[in-house]
Image: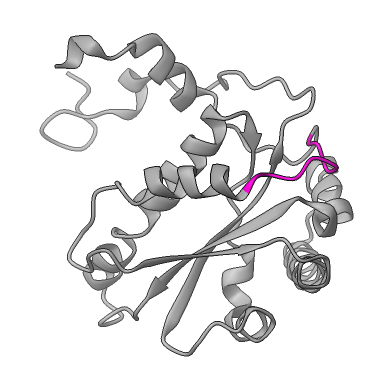
């Protein structure tokens, strides 16, 4: 069965799913059927104990996008000020035009973590984050750029008010999406597997 897959193509998609904050086509809308197709791929992701409790909110109305973009700007600038960090050009490019992005996709969970323990949170988010990553890969395969953003998760109530999200639903990541326009997506310089992998016990590379 594995021989039927083109591993070069699969590895290329997986290895070049970069964060795209610039070089996006802000004028070209994304067809809703294309978004549905990508979400159909996303919901094939494996699930944990929480099951298939994913929900996706797509925002393409200019007024709502503008409201969300303003909240995102506030969160990012506040975070950078608290950490005394500069605003990177790529992040500036994102917040300057986020309100113009063709669509925003919020990946939500219908439910709440059962406890504060690490195991509870791993189990809870383990059923939604694989779907969010599959969605990002499906978008990448269709030449749609995005970036994994989680800053808005700190403003759950504000976002919920804008989008009418009911109580009991958790927002995880928001993917701002647009067709790429001149973006060159390639493999990043990363540590080799042999440097970050241990066998049988921590620190043992052999």
Residue 188, horizontal then vertical, whole percent = 57, 22
The foreground one among 33 and 68 is: 33
Residue at 30 percent of width and 47 percent of height: 45
On the picture, is 202 further left or further right than 13?
Answer: left
Residue 152, by quadrant, is: bottom right
The foreground one among 189 and 48 is: 48
Q: Residue furthest left?
A: 200
Residue 28, by quadrant, is: top right
Residue 116, horizontal then vertical, whole percent = 31, 80
| In the depicted structure, whether residue 109 falls above or below residue 168 | above
Q: Is residue 73 visible?
A: yes
Q: Residue furthest right?
A: 96
| In the depicted structure, whether residue 122 falls above or below residue 190 | below
Position of the C terminus, as image quadrant, is top left
Residue at 64 percent of width and 78 percent of height: 163
Report the magenta residues as a range. Answer: 24-31
The question of residue 30 being in magenta is answered with yes
Residue at 81 percent of width and 36 percent of height: 25
Residue 78, horizontal then vertical, whole percent = 78, 70
| In the depicted structure, whether residue 65 falls above or below residue 13 | below
């Amino acid at each position: 069965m594995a021989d039927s897959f083109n591993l070069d193509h699969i590895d290329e998609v997986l290895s070049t799913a970069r964060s795209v904050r610039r070089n996006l086509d802000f004028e070209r809308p994304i067809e809703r059927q294309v978004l549905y197709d990508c979400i159909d791929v996303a919901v094939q992701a494996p699930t944990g104990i929480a099951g298939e409790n994913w929900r996706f909110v797509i925002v393409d109305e200019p007024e709502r996008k503008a409201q969300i973009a303003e909240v995102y700007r506030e969160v990012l600038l506040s975070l950078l000020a608290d950490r005394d960090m500069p605003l990177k050009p790529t992040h500036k490019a994102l917040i300057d035009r986020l309100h113009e992005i063709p669509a925003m996709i919020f990946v939500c969970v219908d439910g709440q973590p059962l406890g504060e323990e690490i195991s509870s949170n791993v189990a809870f988010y383990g059923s939604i984050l694989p779907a969010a990553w599959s969605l990002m890969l499906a978008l990448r395969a269709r030449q749609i750029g995005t970036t994994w953003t989680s800053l808005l998760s700190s403003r759950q109530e504000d976002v919920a008010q804008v989008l009418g999200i009911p109580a009991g639903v958790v927002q995880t990541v928001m993917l701002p999406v647009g067709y790429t326009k001149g973006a060159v997506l390639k493999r990043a310089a990363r540590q080799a597997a042999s440097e970050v992998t241990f066998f049988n016990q921590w620190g043992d590379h052999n």
